[in-house]
Amino acid sequence: MIGLPFKDTQCGFKAFKRPAAQVVFRLQRIERWGFDPEILFIARKLGYDIREVPVTWGHDERSRMSYLKDGMKMLEEMAVIRANSVAGLYDEAIAALKDTSTMVTEPVSRVKVNPRPQANG
C-alpha cells in the first residue's frame, strides 16, 4: 500500500543514528500501529540507508493483539500514510525542516543522507 520492500514492518527493532532519528521523528504523524511503517516510509523518502537484519525474538504471552481489530487499524493507518504522501504533507514538512535555521536539530539539507540504490532492470 505504501511501497515498503520489507518482510515485516511491525516486529523487530528500529535503530537510527541520532541525526536521522531527529529528522524522521519530527516528521512522524501517527502514534499507533502505523508508527513503524510510517517512520520507515519517511526514512526511505529521505533516502536514508535502511537495512533489514535478522534478530532473535522472544514471544511475550502477555501480549494482547487482535489480528482482526488491530489488523484493520493498521490498514487504516497505512491508508493515512498513503493519503498524507499523496497530499504532499511529508514533502511540506521536509521543506519546512530545510528552511528552519534556528532548530537544535540539523536541517535536512545538512544531514548526510545515503541515496537509495537504483533498481536495475
Image (cartoon, grey):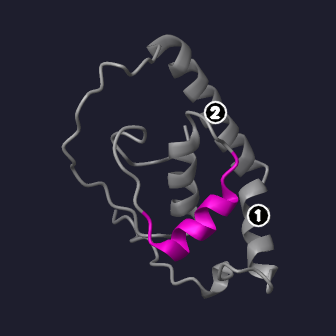
Residue 77 - label: 2
Q: Disc 2 to disc 1, how far (Cα)? A: 19 Å
- Mark 1 residue type: Ala
Residue at 39% x, 71% y: name it: 117
Q: Which SS class for mark 1?
A: helix
Query: Who is closer to the viewer here, 49 or 101?
Result: 101
Asked where in the image residue 30 lies, by quadrant, the reply is: top right
- Mark 2 residue type: Glu
Residue at 36% x, 49% y: name it: 13
Residue 61 - label: none
Query: Who is closer to the viewer here, 88 or 15?
Result: 15
> Residue 10, how many percent across, how many down?
42, 38
> Residue 108, how many percent across, how many down?
65, 78
Q: Work out which quarter of the rendered image holds the C terminus and state it.
A: bottom left
Q: Is the magenta stretch mostly helix, strand or loop?
A: helix
Q: Which of marks 2 and 1 is nearer the N terminus?
A: 2
What residue range appears in magenta?
Answer: 16-29
Q: Which SS class for mark 2?
A: helix
Instruction: Name the residue that disc number 1 marks.
Output: 93
Can residue 25 be found in the magenta stretch?
Answer: yes
Asked where in the image residue 116 lies, by quadrant, the reply is: bottom left
